[in-house]
Amino acid sequence: MTTHRRWRLAMAATLALVGAVGVVAQTASEPDTTTADPPPPVPRVHVVPYDGPITPVASDFLVDRLAEADAAGVEAVIIELDTPGGLDSSMRDIIKAMLASPVPVIVHVAPSGARAASAGAFITLAAHASAMAPGTNIGSASPVQMGGAIQDTTVAAKVSNDAAAYIASLARQRGRDEELARKFVTEALNLTATEAREAGMIDVVAATTTALLDSLDGRTVTLEGREETLAIAGAEVTERDMGARRSLLMRLVDPNVAYILMLIGIYGLFFELSNPGAFAPGILGGICLLLALFAFQALPVNYAGVALIILGTVLLILEVKVTSFGALTIGGIAALVLGSLMLFDSAEPWAQVSLRVMIPAIAVFAGFFILCVWLVVRGHRRPPVTGPEAIAGEQGRVVRPIGGGADRGKVVVHGETWDAVADVEIPVGQLVEVESVVGRVVHVTGVGEAIGREPEPKES
């Protein structure tokens, strides 16, 4: 073999060796993708806190959050509930949305000290899974007629039986004790968190959201006829609160706020009617009345109470215009008090006006009109300070002699010259006192000797 050929073979071998080493190095540097599985995605959970009565605002908020969770594709929605109860219609709207939700809905009565009373008990039992924090309670779901007391025993029985059947059907759907659920309505039964867990009315007792997620992880729930296992341990939690707009609306449906808005509205319209063209009182009053009407649609309003408040206001306004020696004021205050007490007809504390708000409001409202009446009466009793009537009883000086009877002279009173008559003759310079005024003629009587200057007028 020649030297040239041996050289070519050596070069080929060297190149082959270098290529082999490169392939091995590249293979060693690449990760092994054939055996490693991708990390599982972190589950996501929306937490929706709600604290307050169940009203149309609450219904709109919770239904919207359930739809939002479905669109976001989260693994579960947790409603942190604290409510004294509320309207039956709003409660049923929320429950309908929960039962139709493709996302598991978990109701957590929290934090410690919270409650799920009345409508809240229905919502808790309707959830796919339910929990309570230590120190909470559930129950007292006996129906209270909104807008008037239930007088007819047959009607009362119908309402109670309807509510009992509804809560029993929810308990049956979630595999809970139907008879115990009925007692929430028929006997106003109330259970603590521990008692509810032992009775099977809730699934777990959990103090925090993290503890709740760990406790319910792996539990099977039924969604629209299909079963689904919750995988929510260590989930990424996102809180979805009400936002500024709904928070404002929630404040408006407070009975105390609605009551004050109504009174301010009446005040505003009164000022506008008393002073046409002021605009500001009328605009403010109109806005407040509209806001009060918005609140009334979510509250158990007794319109007889509204009518009495309006009547009381009208009577107080008439007292300013008509002299009734206080009768209209007394009637107006009585109508205001009775109307305020009757305004919201419900046994539920959340739907009543606090006496701490009612008493000062009535006192200010009535006090304003009483002050107006007092000022009017005081003005009527004061002697005139301008015009011809203002000089009656004042003293002046004769500047042209006055003959007896119809023979006129001239007097100066308060720097003004008046035609004057008297029963007797009065010479120039004599002090006189004005007894009466008829047109531009004063009737005077002499009171003293002549002086060189006009006397000072008497104090009124």
Image (cartoon, rainbow, N blue to C red):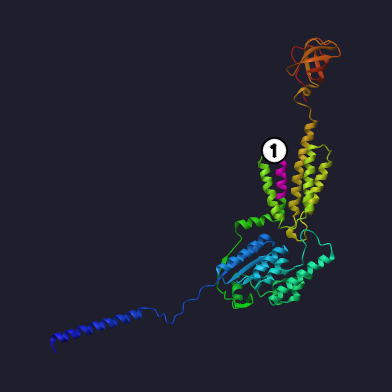
Question: Looking at the picture, does residue 102 appear above or below residue 61?
Answer: below
Q: Could you tell me if residue 85 is visible in this image? A: no
How far across and down, in percent of the image, does residue 80 sit?
A: 64, 67
- In the image, residue 65 sits, relative to residue 194, either above or below, namely above
- Identify the residue at image location x=21%, y=84%: 12
Q: Is residue 437 left or right of residue 299?
A: right
Q: Nearer the viewer, residue 295 or 217?
A: 295
Disc 1 is placed on an element classified as loop
The dominant secondary structure in magenta is helix
Q: How many marks?
A: 1
The residue carrying mark 1 is 276
Residue drawn at the location 70% of the way across and 44% of the way down: 268
How far from the left and from the top, in percent, is residue 375? Answer: 76, 36
- Residue that extends furthest to the bottom in the rendered view of this protein: 1
Instruction: Determine if the magenta segment contains residue 272.
Output: yes
Q: Position of residue 273 (x, y in %)?
A: 72, 40
Q: Position of residue 143 (x, y in %)?
A: 77, 65
Q: What is the quadrant of residue 230 in the picture?
A: bottom right
Which residues are drawn in magenta?
261-274
Whether the magenta-drawn stretch holds residue 351 is answered as no
Image quadrant where one finds the N terminus: bottom left
The amino acid beneath tag 1 is: Pro
**Can you say whether 347 is above or below 432 in the image?**
below
Q: Nearer the viewer, residue 268 or 430?
A: 268
